[in-house]
Image: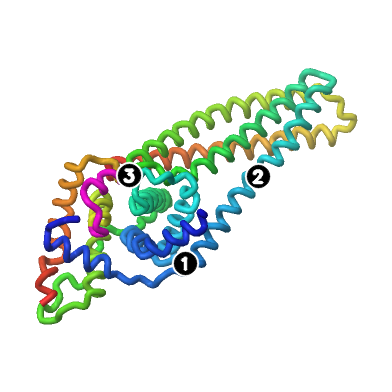
Amino acid sequence: VNDARFDRLLREHEAVVRRLAHSYERDPARRQDLVQEIWLAIWQALPRFRGDASERTFVFRIAHNRAVTHIEHWRRRRTEALDEDAPVADAAPDPERALSQQQRHERLRAAVQALPLNLRQVVVLALEGLSHAEVADIVGISENNVAVRMTRARAELTRRLGGAGRRMRS
Amino acid sequence: MTNDPELKEWAADWQAGSDQESSAEAIRLYAQGRNRFMWTWVLLELSIGAIALPVLGYLGWVAPDPVQRWAMWLLALITIAAMSVGWWNWRGSLLASARTTAEYLAVSAERLRRMRQAWRIGWIVLVAQVVVFSVWIWTRPFGAAAAERFAWGWLLFMTLTAVALMWWMDRRIRRDADTFEALKRELL
């Protein structure tokens, strides 16, 4: 039963887990390790999952906790998983050139990767469509705190994307 | 979901991201394989303990003198401690399902605190072990001087190895504690 359930979770949330891993790790090999560690943790936790939260919350919770361990692991080795001060590529693009959705995704991802960890954690969940209440439940902070962090993250993203996010769509 | 139009646009862009997909089958095989490996490791440790403990207990029981008896029982104690640490580490790998990140960090910090306690107890056991084995070698009639030198050398080697291991553990625990504190400050 768990094998079938795991396969279903894998099908439904694989892309989400990959995006989340990408927001914490730029290096492709280490990112692949993180993705595998997340799925291993899900595999191990699945038999004890009693449905007290949605499956989506369950997956996000484990993914974030594993990401924290990943960051801790690499910091201990004095290697940053992500350089938070890295510039966002193509921060001031030609306004005449409308970017494809994939390009917009890459710019947004670079901007998210550059956020401080506490902001990145909430914004990644919000971008996946989770409500403030769900984010608060996963991270273990109050909804007010989520709102405050989201406001700061949003301002930071707007600044890093050069306020061009919407202009580029024209 | 938010009513903020810009955030909605960002969410659409974000969710449109198409990294190269991992093979679902490969991930499943990896998870199964690692899980099997961890279980095998735990069972191996338990099996070694299940054989070693009765043997050491018996040798301690039939030992002709109290020093040898204590030496065997202390070895049994070290075996139990090693098995407990192995089990504890394995249980630790299941912590990722903690309810929140805050809880996860708290449990991780608690694990580190207990590891530090275990480290302190480890020093006491090591000192006791060295004392007992020193008395044992000192009082045991070896017959040949070379055999006695070998026994002292072996004890010295084992002690230095254990001290190096304890030193490495101390550094690791300190580093883990510092990193977790920094993460806690950053995340919560």
Residue furthest to the top in view is: B66
Residue wearing tag 2 = B43
Q: Amino acid at mark 2?
A: Leu
Residue A85 appears in the rendering: no
Subunit ID for the residue under disc 2 = B
Image location of residue B166, percent across then percent down: 56, 36
Subunit ID for the residue under disc 1 = B
Q: Nearer the viewer, residue B64 or B39?
A: B39
Kindly report which numbered mark, 2 or 3, lies closer to the viewer in this rendering. Answer: 2
Q: In this rendering, would A112 be left or right of A170?
A: right
Residue wearing tag 3 = B183
| Residue B142, placed above or below residue B101 | above
Residue wearing tag 1 = B24
Q: Mark 2 or mark 1, which is nearer the start of the sequence?
A: 1
Q: Secondary structure at mark 3?
A: helix
| Residue B142, placed above or below residue A36 | above
Residue A150 appears in the rendering: yes
